[in-house]
Amino acid sequence: MAQPSPYRPGREHTSRTYPVIPPIYQTTTFELDDQAYEDIQGTGGLHETWYSRFNNPTVDAAAADVARLHGAGQALMTASGMAAIATTLVTLLRSGDTLVAARLVYGDTNDLLERDLPGLGVNVVRVNAFSVDAWREAIAAHRPAVVYGETLSNPQLRLMDIPTVVQTAHGAGARVVIDNTFATPLCTRPLELGADVVVESATKFLAGHSDVVAGAVTTDDRALHEEIQRRVVTFGGSMDAHAAFLVWRGLRTFRVRLAEACRTAAALADLMASEAGITGVVYPGRADHPDAGTVVARVMPGPHGAMLALVIEGGDERALEVIRRLQVAVEATSLGGVESLASLPFNSSHFNMTPQQRRDAGILPGMLRLSIGLEGEEALAGDLRRALKRAG
Ligand SMILES: Cc1ncc(COP(=O)(O)O)c(C=O)c1O
């Protein structure tokens, strides 16, 4: 045990009572003792709180809450969602391995798959994620080490049939990694559906206030958790204590925030379905969703998420006129905040595709993506109606 010293005041737990809220451990380093040296020499320091790139109690508090949301034994926090994804994939893949991945994934993940992993000797095969047959064929033909997909696609909001893909992948000896950012653990818990690892941008719904960039990796496989942790440490993608506090604080209201945002999204989807000037509404809870029925029932039985896509009559240019006139929802990239965020795939997430490529990918002209916050459906519907009217 560290000895008290008058030269180092304020380090001991001096009050008789404990704080209700975890302190922000704004310290890079912790005083060493024999036990710390033992862990450093035994496991490289993965289990000990001795240097904050390895472990920090505020970060541990956030990780414990993410693990609980997924019903998992442990979780790892990272500096961003991309740190979670890249570190996980580099941990699981070796030169010569094959990765079978969804064709449409988040843009920077796509860069990782197309520009970085091949340079490390990984053979990357892409499939139509909404076709179980496409997954089956690719897995049988390529015998991948890893299968990668997103629970809910952006912005088409199509669902990956996780249990079916997991069964095929495990039958072929592959591990399954799922990006669950859009769905969130309120709606989908991929580990319970058989996935091996869940990666998430905690920047979004988990933290929930558009004020912190963060990531999480959750797996029930303790050895794999430690393998990924070791690389978070060596690649330097560790979360810092202030970010961890914001994530922890956001997670305190995760369930109520998400339940309300999902309820609003469902109600707004129905209101907008009969609105003049809107030719399509995409929401996984609606009967006209392409995955309604077995896939939705298996993967996202309800609530059905807080993401919603609308198709504005008149195409992308008119959708731009509409989005610029919104006063409640904010035109911004990202998602998952308490404020609703609106974006157009054609000039943001999918600007580098041709109009035909977007159409082939199910991104229709005039598609407007909404991440639903806490303003309520009446305020958001009124905002959209006013914007549609003013756009002419
Ligand atoms: C589905 C998805 N995965 C991963 C990321 C990357 O997360 P971050 O920005 O926290 O690195 C994003 C970011 O928008 C995302 O939408």
Image (cartoon, helix red, strand yellow):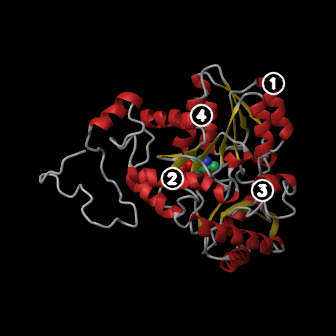
Tell me: 366 left or right of 85.
right
Residue 220 x %, y %: 60, 42
Residue 225, position in %: x, y? Answer: 54, 38
Q: Quick one: label 1 or label 4, which is nearer the N terminus?
A: 4
Nearer mark to the viewer, of 2 and 1: 2
Q: Residue at x 77, y 62 (%)?
A: 283
Q: Residue at x 48, y 58 (%)?
A: 247
Mark 3 or 1, nearer chain start? 1
Give the label on residue 365, or none: 3
Q: CA distance from mark 2 to mark 3?
A: 42 Å
In the structure shown, which secondary structural element does the residue marked by tag 4 occupy?
helix
Q: Amino acid at mark 2?
A: Ala
* Circle 3: residue type: Pro
Q: Which mark is residue 64?
A: 2
Mark 4: few/some/many CA within 10 Å (<14, 14-19, 20+): many
Front position in the image: 153 or 185: 185
For disc 4, the marked residue is: 89
Mark 4 or 2: the one toward you: 2
| Mark 4 close to ligand 1, CB under 8 Å | no
Where does residue 93 sit, x and y in percent of width and height?
A: 61, 27
Q: Mark 2 vs mark 3: give the one in front.
A: 2
Q: Sort mark 2 into few (<14), some (14-19) or many (20+) by Cα contacts within 10 Å.
A: some
Q: CA distance from mark 3 to mark 4?
A: 33 Å
Q: Amino acid at mark 1?
A: Ala
Determine which of the numbered discs, if any, sits on residue 141 in the image: 1
* Mark 2 secondary-structure assignment: helix
- What is the distance, in whole Å, between disc 2 and disc 1 at their CAs? 39 Å
